[in-house]
Image (cartoon, helix red, strand yellow):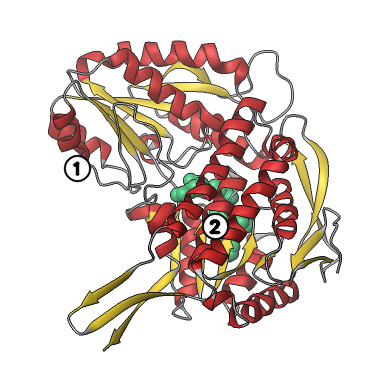
Amino acid sequence: MTATRSSTDLYIGGGWRASTSAELIDVTDPRTELVVAQVAAGSAEDADLACRAARRAFADGWGSSAPVVRAQLLQRLHGELVLRREELVADVMLDLGVPRRVAEAVQVDLPLEVLAGFVEVLAEPQYEERIGSSLVVREPVGVVAALTPWNYPLHQVVAKVGAALAAGCTVVVKPSEVAPLVVHRLFDAAHAAGFPPGVLNLLSGTGSDVGSALVAHHEIDLVSFTGSLRGGIEVGQAASARLVPTILELGGKSAAVVLPDADLGLAVRSTAASVLLNSGQTCNALSLLIVPQDRIDEAAFLAAEHFRSMEAKLGPLASQQQWARVQRLLADSIAAGSTVVTGGPGRPDGVESGFFVRPTVLTHLGPSDHIHGVEVFGPVLVVLGYASEDEAVNLANASPYGLSGAVWSGDLDVAVAFARRMRTGQVAINGAAFNPLAPFGGVGASGWGRELGRHGIEGFSYLKSLQL
Ligand code: NAD
């Protein structure tokens, strides 16, 4: 076991070590399609070592440690990450091909803010409640398996690890094999921060191999999964077979609804920016724009203008697989009769390689087109029209998902009343900013459980009533 690492090492029990498997997975730069690194295709044996190390660390004191101790270590982790900011930015640019400004502001600085939020919550008085003769307290659930996707690789790990450690749990992380580099760097920071051995462990590899071995491991007390609907169902079923609770943060098809008295131009630009962020690979992207029927063409035109102005500034999609999926969804929608206002299948003009796509605005969908209910996970905006407020609510609630949404109105009370009719975990009113301390999560096919802030920490604990 060593303090320094090669990219193929795993972090288990407080140090870097080689996987028990000799197999490797290529990491590809999505801009060039060149292999830039390799990580280990971890094994079930690695998962077993990591889970046992996490159990020992939980029993050896982390599970009963004082919140102030956990806050100090999380604060140190924050400091170590800040020291490595430039390396983290470079890693995530290779992992995902994102432009520098997105890598800095969203991929790295947002998770730093999220982590600082957990430290803040730990500084507040901890939950305790008297109910009649009972004292109700919270206890950490134990050993957590954290499975994360590739689109915001550092943020998703920090959202789980920060909250789980704050709650007093120990963690085994299995990040996405598509974007692992920035997560390995996070573990350099965690090592330097000085967490007790086994409190935090890192595996690498695919979901079907090491991921499923982790979920099935008898030492795991809770599985926190962020990813696709398909992956969430598989993980949810495997965990519930052992009655292990899950937090599932899945996909979305979130609607921005523009009410008749809103500033259409502002609403469209904000929605277009949301769906272009990270090249559309954002679970809470506002990928459905719902406007008064008589303003569909105006809204689609304004969105298309914005998309064209941004095309050259967008990064690629993260993988060949994701690129091919977006091409297929666009081709299907066009074959079903939708109007392409800008974009369409293929790469932008003059771009020959890399997983780049054309930002696309679709409207006037054909009757058999389902793209307004499908998570595309690319820079694709669908514009729909409504004739009445009830129809706008129905359109916003029509997809199986319920992760996010937006409402625009000149009247705040009207906007709030509309937002309350939306079946979704978050709603931004008149372009209000994302709040990293507010609970984040979905309903329906977007999963269950909440991340971030106090509610995120509470997700990793259970209630205990002491009868006095
Ligand atoms: P994915 O489901 O393929 O994988 C997510 C993670 O789980 C990966 O680490 C993967 O290796 C692992 N995994 C997959 N199947 C598994 C299984 N059966 N057992 C154990 N582990 C398994 O998702 P992805 O393609 O990496 O990410 C994109 C998806 O993530 C999109 O659908 C997006 O909407 C969703 N997402 C949701 C949120 C949210 O907070 N709700 C945030 C970001 C991304």
Residue 396 in which image quadrant = top left
Residue 118 in view, yes or no:
yes
Residue 183 in percent (x, y) is at 68, 51
454 vs 135, nearest the viewer:
135
* Label 2: which secondary element: helix
Residue 190 in which image quadrant = bottom right
Residue 304 in which image quadrant = top left
Q: Are marks 1 and 2 in contact (CB under 8 Å)?
A: no
User: What is the crowding at mark 1: few (fewer than 14 residues within 10 Å), some, or many (at least 20)?
Assistant: few
345 vs 149, nearest the viewer:
149
User: What is the crowding at mark 2: few (fewer than 14 residues within 10 Å), some, or many (at least 20)?
Assistant: many
The nearer-to-camera label among 1 and 2 is 2
The CA span between labels 1 and 2 is: 30 Å
Residue 393 in percent (x, y) is at 20, 37
Q: Residue furthest bottom?
A: 468
For residue 256, side relative to residue 56 (left or right):
left
Which residue corresponds to mark 2?
A: 162
Residue 361 in percent (x, y) is at 44, 21
Which residue corresponds to mark 1?
A: 420
Which amino acid does the dot numbered 2 rest on? Answer: Gly
Residue 160 in percent (x, y) is at 53, 58
N-terminal label among 1 and 2:
2
* Residue under the point 79% across and 66% down: 15
Q: In the displayed structure, would residue 459 be above or below residue 281?
A: below
415 vs 330, nearest the viewer:
415
